[in-house]
Amino acid sequence: MLVGLLIIVPLIAGLLVFGTKGKAIRNIALGFSLVEFALSLVALLQYKHNPASSDLVLNCTWVESLGIHFAVGLDALSLLLVLLTTFLIPLIILSSFKIEYEKPNSFYGLILIMQMALVGVFTANDGFLFYVFWELALIPIYFICLLWGGENRGAITFKFFVYTLLGSLFMLVGLIYVYSHTGFETGIKSWAIADLYQAGRSLDVNQQSFVFWCIFLAFGIKMPIFPLHTWQPDTYVNAPTQGTMLLSGIMLKMGTFGLIKWLLPLTPLAMEKWGGVAIGLSVFGIIYASCIAIVQKDYKRLIAYSSIAHVGLIAAGILSCTQQGIQGGVMQMLAHGVNVVGLFLIADILLRHTGTRDIDKLGGIRSMNGNFAVLFLIIMLGSVALPLTNGFVGEFLLINGVYQYSAIAAAFAGLTVILGAVYMLRSYQSIMLGERKDSSIAFGSLAGSDKLVLYIICFVIVAFGVYPAPLNDLAEEGTKMIMQNLK
Amino acid sequence: MKGLLIISGLGILAMLAEIFKFKKVLYPLVLIGILAAYALGFTEWNSNYNIEMFSNMIRFDNVALAFSGVILATAFFWFILANDYFEKDHLTDHFALVLFALVGALMLTAFSNMTTLFLGIEILSIPMYVLAASRKRDLASNEAGFKYLIMGSFASGFLLFGIALIYGATGSFDLMAIRAYISHNGADLPAFFYAGVLLILVAMLFKVSAAPFHFWAPDVYEGSPTVITALMSTIVKTAAFAAFMRLFLVTFGGVNETWGIVLAVVIALSLVVSNITAATQQSVKRMLAYSSISHAAFMLMAILANNRGMASVSAILYYSLAYSIGSIAAFTVVYHVSKQESGSSNIEAFNGLAKRHPLMAVCMTVAMLSLAGIPVTSGFFAKYFVFSLLIGTSYNWLIILAILTSAVGVYYYFKVIIAMYFKAPAKEDGITIDSSHVVLLLLTTLFTIALGLVPNFVIEIFG
C-alpha cells in the first residue's frame, strides 16, 4: 500500500497545485514533495525492517485479457532510485524560489506529476506499466521545457521529444515481442516482469539481438549514449534550470536503471554477443564528450557534456554485467544525480548574479563571496570523484567492473577521471579564482533558498563520501538480485 | 436492428418537419432518437437477433451492434458539434441527409449480402456528396462535392464489377455462402474470382482513402464545411472499416494470400505518403485529412493480421472509437478557430490559443496526444493493440515502418500544440464558445482519457 501512496500522492498534489492560484503555490508544492520524501523514508525503514513486507508491493489487475497488471513494488534497487527522486524533487522546487515563473501553478503541477511518473518507472514490475510510466514522464518535461525554456525552445524541445519518443516506441516493440513469447506452458500471456525474463531467455540469440537493440535504443537515447546524444546539450542548455535538473538528475537514470532491470536479465545471450559493441559506444562517448566539455565556454553546456561522459561510464559498467560494474553503476547514479543538480544550480546562480555563464568573462568570484566558493568547490570535487566524496565509490567500482570485462576498455574509461578533472578544475579556476575579468560584474551574497540547497547537497556529498555503507549495502543487495537473474 | 429502424424513421420525420412545421423540436427529437437507438442496441446484445432478417440480407450480430454503438455514440457527439450548422436554411434537408447517411453507415456494419453492402455504401455516400457541397456559394465546397461524387462513383463501379465477378465464380451474393464456397473449392477457384476480390479491395480502399487511392480525400476534407469533414472522418470511416472487416476477415479470409500482400503494400504506401505530406501542410484541416489516411493504414494493419480472429475485430473497434472521439474533439476546436479567422484553419490561426481560450487548448492538446498515440490516452492503446496483433507475423517490417512514420506524425500534431502554447496570438481577444460545445469538449476529452485508463470495456466486449 505504501508504494501505492508513493505514486498517488504526487499525482494528487500535482492536480491540486494545478488548481490553486497565488503566491503560496511554491510552498504548497514544496510541502507535498517533503511529504513524499517522508513517505519514501518510511518505505526505507519498512524495507530495512522486513524486505518482504506487503506494504512494499501492489498488484491489481488492469486489463485482464491481455495480462496487464498495475504491479509495482520496491526492492533494493528501486528503493534507492525512488529515494533519489524524492530527495531531489524538494531540492529542485526549493532551487526555484528565487525565480519568478509565469503560471507557477502549471510549473509546479507539472513537476509533481513528473515525480509520479518517475516513481512509477522505478517501481513498475509489469512491462506494460513500465512503458506507460516511461512515456508519461516525457509529457510533463516536454511542457516544462517548452513553456519556460530559453530562446530557441520550440525546435529544440521538439527534437528532444521526437528522439525519445522514437526510442521508446522501439522499446515497446521489443517488449511486445518478448510478451508475445510468454505463456508457452500456461497459454496465458503475461506482462509480469518474471514472465518476461523467462520468455526473453527462451528466445534464440537472433531474436534476443532484435529485442536487445530495440530496447537499447530507447535507453541509449534517454541517457544519452554516443551517437544518440545529439538532442541532449541543446535541450539541457535551453530548458529552464529546474527542467535541466529533472532531466539530468533523475530522468537520465531512467535509462541506466532500465538497462539494469529491463534489459540485462531479458536478453543475456544478446548481451554476450553485442555487449562489446555497446560498451565500445559508451566508452567512446566518455572520451568524446569529455574532449568537447574541455573547450566549452558556456558553463551550463560544459556540465551537459560532462553528464554525457559520466553516464557513458555508468553504462559501460552496467553493460559489463559484473557485480562491481552494476553496483558501481547504481552508486554512481545516486552520486551523479545529487552532484549534477548542484552543478546546474551553480550555473543558474552564476547567471542570476552576473548575467552570464561565459567562463571567459567570469573570474575572481571567490574574492567576492568566499562562502559560495567553498560550496562550489565541494560539489565540483564530488563531481570529479575525489576520495571521500560521494562520487568516488561508484567510479572506483565502475572502472573495476569494466576492467573485468576488458582491460583496454577500462584504460579508456579510466581517462574520464583525468579528463573530468581537467574540465572541472579548469572551469572552476577560471570562474572563481584569479582577478575579476569584467569589473562590471558583481557577486553579492547568496539567497537563503539557494544557500540551503547547496548546503544540503554538500552535506550529502561529504557524508556519503565518508560513510557510503548504507547506500552501498542496498546497492549490493539490489545488484545481487539482478546477478541471480543473469546466470 | 431497432436502431436502424429508428434512425430511418427519424430521417423521414425530418423531411416531414418542413411540411408539418415542427422544425423547432426536430433537433432535440433527433438527439433523443439517437439515444433511444443506442439504448435499444443494448437490449439486442447477445439476443436472438443473430438470426438473419430480410431473407439473409442483414444480420445484427454482436460485432454489428458494437460498431453501430460506436457510430451512434459518435453521431450523438457530432450532432452536438453541429448544432449551429443546422441553424441555416435548408435545415430539414440537412437533417434528413445526415440521418440517411447514418442509416447507410449502420447497414454497413450489419450487411450479410453483397447487395446490402452495395446499398449501404450508396445510402451512405449519396447524402455525403450533397453534404460536402452544402455550402452552395462556396467554390471549394462545390469542388469538394463534385470530386467526391466522381471518385465515389468510380469506386462504386469497381465494387459492382467485383461483386459481379464474385457472383460469377461462386453463384451467390450471400457472404456465408461465398465463404463456404471458398473453403470447399479453395484450390480451383477461377482467375476472375481473384480479380473480383481485388476489385472489391480497390473499391473499399477508395472508401477508406488509403494511398494510392487517397487523392480525393484532402481536397474533399478541406473544401467541405468543417462539421461535414468531421462526419466524414469519423462515422463514414468507422462504417467503411466495419464493412472492410466483414468482407476481408470473414468472407475472403480464406484467400488472404491474394489480397494480403496487396494490402501490405497499400499500408506501407499510406503510412509514408500520408505522414510525410501531412507534415508539410499549413492548414490544420488538411493536416487532419492526411493524418486520417495514416490512421486508416493502422486499422488496415489490424485487418492484415487476419489469423487473430476476434482480437483483430476488437482492435479495429477500439481504434475506430478512439479515433472518432479524438477527431470530434479536434474538429470542434478547428471549427471554432477557423470561425474566428473567417474560415481559414491555417496553423497560424492556432497561435496563442492557450491564452485566448485555455479549455480549448487543453482539449486540443489531449486530442493531439491521443491521435499521436501517447499514453495514457486511448490513441496509445489503439496503436498498441495493432502492434501486438502484427508482431511475430511476417509483417514485422510494417511495424518498424509504422513507428518511424509515427515519429513524423508527432511532428505535425505537436506543431499544433506548440502553436497554441508557444506562439504569440495575432488577436488578443478571447474566444467565446457555446456552452454545449464546452460540454462536448469536456466529454470527449474525458472519454479519451477514460478509454485509455480502462480499455477493458471495449477490448473485452466480445468475451
Image (cartoon, coloured by chain):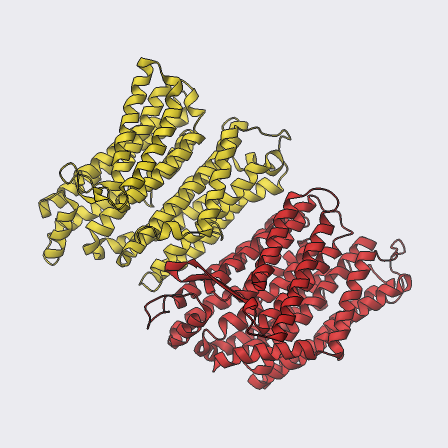
Chain colours: A red, B yellow
Visible in this render: residue B133? no
Q: Position of residue A209 (x, y in %)?
A: 43, 73
Q: Quadrant of residue B45?
A: top left
Q: Position of residue B15 (x, y in %)?
A: 30, 20
Quadrant of image for the N terminus of chain A: bottom right
Left or right of A347, for residue A437: right
Q: Residue at x 63, y 36 (%)?
A: B355
Left or right of B189, for residue A391: right
Left or right of A387, for residue B221: left
- In this picture, is B446 found above or below A32? above
Task: Report the label total.
Answer: 0
Q: Position of residue A204 (x, y in %)?
A: 37, 76
Visible in this render: residue B188? yes
- In this picture, is A50 found above or below A89? below
Q: Position of residue B96 (x, y in %)?
A: 32, 24
Q: Quadrant of residue B120?
A: top left
Q: Nearer the viewer, residue A316 or B33?
A: B33
- In this picture, is A478 found above or below B429? below
Q: Nearer the viewer, residue A32 or A337?
A: A32
Left or right of B279, for residue A189: left
